C-alpha cells in the first residue's frame, strides 16, 4: 500500500513539474495585441450616413474596415453633431477618423489642417419643396429669395449665405433633415436642403412623400465624400486611403450609392506641365465638382484639339479665347473667363519689336498652328508663316529663321519652351486676352451648370485665389 502511495506521489510531482514548465514556456510567448479602437465619426443624423439606423452605411463601413485591418483596428461608428465634432477636431492629437466629409466644409481646401483620403463616393446637395409650390435652384440660389428653408443644425450653406445675411432668405435649423421634411409637409417652411443619398430612406420614413414632394433637378452642389484624420495620425490615414480606394471599386458598394455624375472629355493644348495648367486644373476640379459633373483631360496639339471639338470626339476645350466659336461653329462659351493669357512676341536680343502686331508688316513672323487668336491677328501680315507647334516656333526664332514668334504666355519670363537650348530670347508683351472653358454644341445644360459654378467661384473670391497671377492681366 505504501508502495502505491509513493508511486502516486512521484507521478503527481512529475505532472506538477511539467505543468510548471509549460506555464513558464507560455509566459514567454508574445500575447496578441488587442485591436486599436478607432471612432469613425459621422456628423449626419439621417439615414443612411448616421450611426444608428438599421443598415446605416457608417456602421457597415466601420465593420468592413475592421475586417480589412486583420485585427489592427476596431472601427466604431459614432454619431457626433457638427458643433461637438468641430470642437473635437480642433484639439491637437484627437483620435479617430471623420467620414462622409469634404475639405471645403472644414475650412481645409488646401488640405493643411488634416490628413485627407481621396473621394470614395460622389453625392449632391439638393433642394426639395412642395409640388403645389415648386422651387428650383437657379441663378446661384437667387430662386430661393424670400423663402424659408430648413437646414440641419450646424451644417454650412456657403452658396446662399449672402442671401441669408441680406435678409432675403430665412434659415430654420432642424435636428434632422427628415424633421425639415415634416415641417415642409405641414407648411411651416418652403424648402429643405437634403443630401441625394438620403432620399430613398426618407421615402421609407414618409410613405406618402412622393405625392407632395418636388425635387429640384439642378443640385445646389455636387461633391466628393472623403475621410480625414488628425495630422499626426499618418498610419491611420494611409490605411483608410488604401482601403477606401478598394471600396470605391466594389460593385456591391457602388450599387448602394447615387449614380456617378456624367464625365466630359476635355482637351487642352500640349503645355500641360506649366504652372498655369496646374492652377487651371485645380480650378476646373472645383468647378466640375460643384456643377455635378466630372471630366477627363487629354493633352493634344492645338490643331488636333480644334478638330476633336469640331467632330465631337471631345466635349470641350479647357482654355480658348473669347471668340473661339468663330473657329468651332456653335461652341458654347462658359462664363466668366477663368483666366487671362498674354500675347508674347519672342525675338532674339537686339531685335526691335513694334508695340502693335499690325506694325510687323516688314518682319518674318511665325505663328504656331492651331492658336486661332494669333492666326487672326496676323492674317494680313505678308511675312507670316504658320508653323507646326510651339517648340518649332521657338526654335525658328532662336535660329534666326524668323524675326518673331507670336505665342501665348503667362509673363515676360514665363512662356512655353523658355528652357529650350539656344540663344536667350526676349519676350515682348503685346496684349492680353481672356480665356474661357468651351463646350461643344449640344451641351447647353452642362454649359449652364459650369457657368453657375464659375460665377459662384468668382463671387466668393476663390477664382481669383486659385488662378492668381493668371487672372486679370489687363495692363500687364
Image (cartoon, helix red, strand yellow):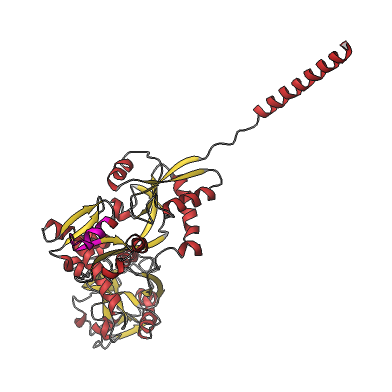
How many callouts does the rendering have? Answer: 0
Image location (x, y in percent) of residue 414: 30, 65
* Whole-percent x, y for residue 412 in the image: 26, 66
Residue 3 lies in the magenta-colored region:
no
Magenta residues span 179-192
| Residue 427 shown left or right of residue 228 in the figure | left
Q: Is residue 375 left or right of residue 26?
A: left
Residue 148, compared with residue 66, is above or below; it is: below
Q: Residue furthest left?
A: 167
Could one spot residue 171 in this view of the protein? yes
Q: Looking at the figure, which quarter contains the N terminus? A: top right
Is 70 located above or below residue 217 in the figure?
Answer: above
Specify whether residue 413 is in view. Answer: no
The quarter of the displayed image where residue 117 is located = bottom left
Say which of 282 and 358 sits in front: 282
Relative depth, front residue between 475 and 230: 230
Q: Nearer the viewer, residue 386 or 402?
A: 386
Up/down of 449 relative to 28, above or below: below
Quadrant including the C terminus: bottom left
Residue lying farthest front?
A: 208
Percent coordinates x, y for residue 453 in the rendering: 25, 67
Give residue 69's position: percent from left, percent from top.
Answer: 53, 47
Choose top left, top right, bottom left or bottom right for residue 328: bottom left
24, 431: nearer the viewer? 24
Is residue 190 in the magenta section? yes
Amino acid at each position: 500500500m505504501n508502495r502505491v502511495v509513493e508511486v502516486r506521489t512521484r507521478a503527481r510531482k512529475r505532472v506538477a513539474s511539467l505543468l510548471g514548465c509549460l506555464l513558464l514556456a507560455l509566459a514567454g510567448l508574445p500575447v496578441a495585441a488587442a485591436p486599436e479602437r478607432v471612432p469613425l465619426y459621422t456628423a449626419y443624423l439621417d439615414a443612411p450616413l448616421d450611426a444608428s439606423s438599421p443598415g446605416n452605411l457608417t456602421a457597415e463601413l466601420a465593420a468592413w474596415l475592421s475586417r480589412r485591418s486583420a485585427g489592427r483596428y476596431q472601427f466604431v461608428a459614432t454619431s457626433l453633431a457638427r458643433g461637438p465634432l468641430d470642437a473635437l477636431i480642433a484639439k491637437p492629437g484627437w483620435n479617430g477618423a471623420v467620414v462622409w466629409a469634404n475639405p471645403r466644409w472644414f475650412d481645409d481646401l488646401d488640405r493643411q489642417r488634416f490628413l485627407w483620403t481621396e473621394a470614395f463616393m460622389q453625392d449632391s446637395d439638393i433642394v426639395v419643396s412642395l409640388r403645389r409650390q415648386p422651387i428650383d435652384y437657379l441663378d446661384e440660389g437667387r430662386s430661393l429669395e424670400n423663402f424659408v428653408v430648413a437646414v440641419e443644425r450646424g451644417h454650412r450653406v456657403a452658396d446662399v449665405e449672402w442671401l441669408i445675411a441680406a435678409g432675403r432668405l430665412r434659415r430654420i435649423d432642424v435636428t434632422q433633415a427628415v424633421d425639415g421634411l415634416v415641417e415642409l409637409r405641414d407648411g411651416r417652411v418652403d424648402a429643405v436642403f437634403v443630401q441625394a443619398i438620403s432620399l430613398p430612406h426618407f421615402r421609407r420614413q414618409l410613405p406618402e412623400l412622393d405625392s407632395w414632394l418636388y425635387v429640384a433637378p439642378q443640385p445646389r452642389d455636387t461633391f466628393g465624400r472623403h475621410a480625414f484624420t488628425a495630422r499626426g495620425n499618418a498610419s491611420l490615414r494611409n490605411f483608410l486611403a488604401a482601403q477606401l480606394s478598394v471600396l470605391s471599386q466594389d460593385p456591391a458598394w457602388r450599387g448602394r450609392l447615387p449614380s456617378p455624375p456624367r464625365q466630359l472629355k476635355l482637351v487642352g493644348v500640349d503645355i500641360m506641365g506649366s504652372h498655369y495648367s496646374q492652377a487651371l486644373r485645380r480650378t476646373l476640379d472645383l468647378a466640375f465638382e460643384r456643377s455635378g459633373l466630372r471630366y477627363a483631360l487629354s493633352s493634344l496639339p492645338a490643331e488636333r484639339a480644334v478638330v476633336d471639338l469640331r467632330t465631337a470626339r471631345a466635349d470641350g476645350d479647357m482654355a480658348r479665347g473669347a471668340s473661339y466659336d468663330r473657329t468651332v461653329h456653335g461652341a458654347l462659351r462658359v462664363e466668366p473667363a477663368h483666366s487671362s493669357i498674354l500675347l508674347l512676341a519672342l525675338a532674339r536680343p537686339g531685335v526691335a519689336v513694334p508695340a502693335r502686331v499690325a506694325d510687323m508688316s516688314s518682319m518674318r513672323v511665325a505663328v504656331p498652328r492651331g492658336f486661332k487668336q494669333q492666326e487672326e491677328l496676323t492674317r494680313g501680315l505678308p511675312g507670316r508663316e504658320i508653323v507646326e507647334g510651339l517648340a518649332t516656333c521657338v526654335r525658328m526664332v532662336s535660329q534666326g529663321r524668323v524675326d518673331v514668334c507670336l505665342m501665348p504666355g503667362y509673363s515676360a519670363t514665363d512662356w512655353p519652351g523658355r528652357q529650350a537650348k539656344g540663344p536667350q530670347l526676349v519676350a515682348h508683351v503685346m496684349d492680353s486676352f481672356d480665356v474661357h472653358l468651351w463646350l461643344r454644341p449640344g451641351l447647353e445644360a452642362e454649359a449652364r451648370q459650369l457657368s453657375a459654378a464659375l460665377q459662384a467661384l468668382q463671387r466668393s473670391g476663390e477664382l481669383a485665389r486659385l488662378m492668381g497671377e493668371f487672372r486679370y492681366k489687363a495692363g500687364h
